[in-house]
Image (cartoon, rainbow, N blue to C red):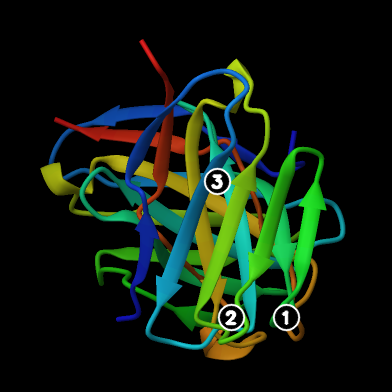
Amino acid sequence: DSGVTQTPKHLITATGQRVTLRCSPRSGDLSVYWYQQSLDQGLQFLIQYYNGEERAKGNILERFSAQQFPDLHSELNLSSLELGDSALYFCASSVALQGASEQFFGPGTRLTVL
Amino acid sequence: GQQLNQNPQSMFIQEGEDVSMNCTSSSIFNTWLWYKQDPGEGPVLLIALYKAGELTSNGRLTAQFGITRKDSFLNISASIPSDVGIYFCAGQLRYGGSQGNLIFGKGTKLSVKP
């Protein structure tokens, strides 16, 4: 158990809908990262928050957004869903912003868009 | 964007065999991490490497940070059935900031020889 929790574990929805994925980092970790894992693209970095502020953006679509709350949990919002958004979404956390820091992954949310 | 080439893509193991896999990049990394992912689970951190030339062990696993900082190797000695899974290398370009996120290889899938 990495200490990172994600809910829900599975999500099935229809095209055009909007969903919210939730992540709670390990106790004491200030950085939260979101990754998307699909069969053809592998693990792709989406976005990073540190202590409530956005710090880095990767290959995140404009239809997707995220935030980190004062209690450090984070939510990833996916809107106008398309079939191709079906994937595993992982949250990871690390303790630091600066300096080398290991990232610990949650169990993921499997999103299926029908 | 940056790419990590991970080889081999898949391999079959027989219990007791040693296993080797590697990752190479055209970019220099400051950190190399190795993760293992079981079906339906999030990646689990196995080994983290922070210095060029560093050799680090975790039980039967040994990983090395290449001297050029563009590659890394993972060896598993005396493999056992529970070693089956997908192994990912991940590189971190810089500490923190906009390039602190991880770039992942496509994975090496370890399966048991039939």
The N terminus of chain B sits in image quarter: bottom left
Mark 3 or 1 closer to N-term?
Answer: 3
Question: Dot 3 surroundings within 10 Å: few (below 14), some, or many (20 or more)?
Answer: many
The residue under the point 87% across, 60% down is: A28
Q: Position of residue A56 (x, y in %)?
A: 50, 81
Disc 1 or disc 2, which is closer to the eye?
A: 2
| Inter-mark Cα distance, 3 to 1 | 21 Å
Label 1 belongs to which residue?
A97
- Taking depth in this image into account, of A61 and B81 the one nearest to the observer is B81
Give the SS element for disc 1.
Answer: loop
Label 3 belongs to which residue?
A22
Give the SS element for disc 2.
Answer: loop
Tell me the kind of residue under disc 2: Gly
Label 2 belongs to which residue?
B100
Disc 3 or disc 2, which is closer to the eye?
A: 2
Tell me the kind of residue under disc 3: Arg
Q: Position of residue B35 (x, y in %)?
A: 59, 49
Q: Is residue B43 visible?
A: no
Q: Residue furthest front?
A: B17
Question: Dot 2 surroundings within 10 Å: few (below 14), some, or many (20 or more)?
Answer: many
- Taking depth in this image into account, of A47 and B4 the one nearest to the observer is B4
The residue under the point 15% across, 47% down is: A84
